[in-house]
Amino acid sequence: MFQAINNYVARTIQLTPDELEYFNAILEYKTVPKKTMLLEPGDICNFELYVNKGCIREYYIDSKGAEITLQFAVEDWCG
C-alpha cells in the first residue's frame, strides 16, 4: 500500500528494514474526495502529506476575498 512513498523516501535516504517497517506503521492512508478542504481557515497544519494520485492546491483568501494560489501538489509530491 505504501510502495510509492517508500520509493519517494528511498530517493533521498536509505532505511533499514526495521526503519522502513516502523515508518510504514505510522503512516495513515486516506482517500480524499475532490473539493475537500484539508484545513479550515485558522487551522494549524500538524501533518505531512504525500500525493499518491491527483493534485492538491494550496491557497489563501486575501483581504478582498480573492483566492490566491500558492502552489499545486501533484502526484509523487511530499510536503
Image (cartoon, rainbow, N blue to C red):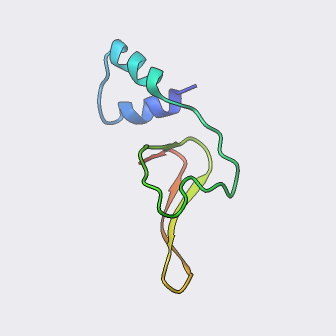
Q: Quadrant of residue 37?
A: bottom right
Residue at x 35%, y 35% (from the top left corner): 11
| Left-right relation of 65 to 26 | right
Instruction: From this view, report whether residue 62 is shown above or below residue 55.
Output: below
- Residue placed most toward the observer, 60 or 44: 44
- Residue placed most toward the observer, 7 or 26: 26
Q: Position of residue 36 (x, y in %)?
A: 65, 54
* Figure disc tally: 0
Q: Quadrant of residue 13?
A: top left
- Residue placed most toward the observer, 16 or 60: 60
Say which quadrant the N terminus sits in.
top right
Which residue, as the protein is rendered here, is positioned at the far bottom?
64
Q: Position of residue 57 (x, y in %)?
A: 55, 61
Which residue, as the protein is rendered here, is positioned at the far front?
42
Residue at x 55%, y 59% (from the top left corner): 40
Q: Position of residue 71 (x, y in %)?
A: 47, 64
Q: Position of residue 33 (x, y in %)?
A: 70, 48
| Left-right relation of 11 to 39 | left
Residue at x 61%, y 37% (from the top left corner): 30
| Left-right relation of 31 to 78 | right
